[in-house]
Amino acid sequence: MSLTVPKNEVTENAEVAATPEVAVNAIPIRPELLLGISSYQDPPSEDEEISLVDRFKGSCEVCGVALTSDMRHSHLHKKLWYNSCGMCYFAENLDGIPSFKKGSIIYFPHMSQARLNSVLRAIWSVESLNDIGDMNDEYNVMSATFDELNAMIEGQINITTSYFDFSDPDILSSLLNLLPPEDYEQRWKLLRSFRWLPDRSVFEDEMVYWAQKSFHHLHPEKINSNITTFMTNYVPAFNIRE
């Protein structure tokens, strides 16, 4: 496996500055996720877990999607604790993905992991509507557009494999597990533009809830405005025209 940083890849970590300690019962600023594994993370203490549960408000503190308590993960990121959804949690805990269909690693600097997660949920929700039955012409056109977007994202798998000789999360997990702690902390130099592309099957149960809570006003005739509203709430600066 060859992992070569592109010549134009930034090699300075914008987040390297020391982060002030934040109490676990206060919601910290939403983090910029970085691919990682759980081997270097300790589980929350009893007090930390209690504080996380107490402050849980029914949404992911990383991307904002609606969650039930059963869908919540205690997520450690840069020594701060978050209540997060599975899509955000497993991006930084690749070795814990609860399925043999672990998805893919893609080189995708165009979107943050949280934004990619939200786009995927939008695509999956449209696909779910498509499964219900025939829709009007406007919906069919929009559905075709989402299919093209999905094909573009999945096309990054082949691009990543061609340039970096891997796209398997297990390969990256194994590589990261071999790194000493000091090198693991510097993994951003290589991985800051890589994302986890999850397999939808991992989140089929969650999709039902997300569709009901986050897409319950979704309608074929208003899909643009509703997707824009959803994405703007969960991913600041999102513009569907882009």
Image (cartoon, rainbow, N blue to C red):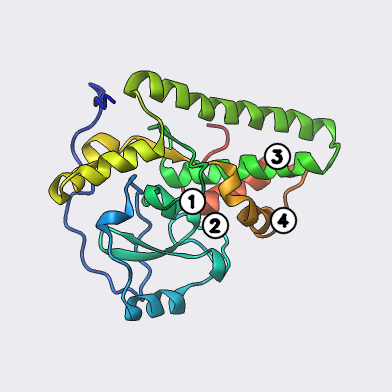
- Residue placed furthest toward the left: 182
Q: What is the distance, in whole Å, between disc 1 and disc 3 at their CAs?
A: 18 Å
Residue 62 in view of the camera? yes
Q: What is the distance, in whole Å, between disc 3 and disc 4 at their CAs?
A: 14 Å
Q: Work out whether mark 4 precedes mark 2 in sequence or the reverse, and give the earlier one.
A: 2
Provide residue 70's location: percent of width, then percent of height: 55, 68
Label 3: which secondary element: helix
Q: What is the distance, in whole Å, between disc 1 and disc 2 at their CAs?
A: 10 Å
97 or 50, which lies in front?
Answer: 97
Three-letter code for the amino acid on which mark 1 is drawn: Met
Residue at 54% over, 54% down = 233
Provide residue 234's location: percent of width, then percent of height: 51, 53
Residue at 36% over, 76% down = 25
Three-letter code for the amino acid on which mark 2 is drawn: Val
Provide residue 213's location: percent of width, then percent of height: 66, 60
Q: Are marks 2 and 3 in contact (CB under 8 Å)?
A: no
Which mark's residue is nearer the viewer, 2 or 3? 3
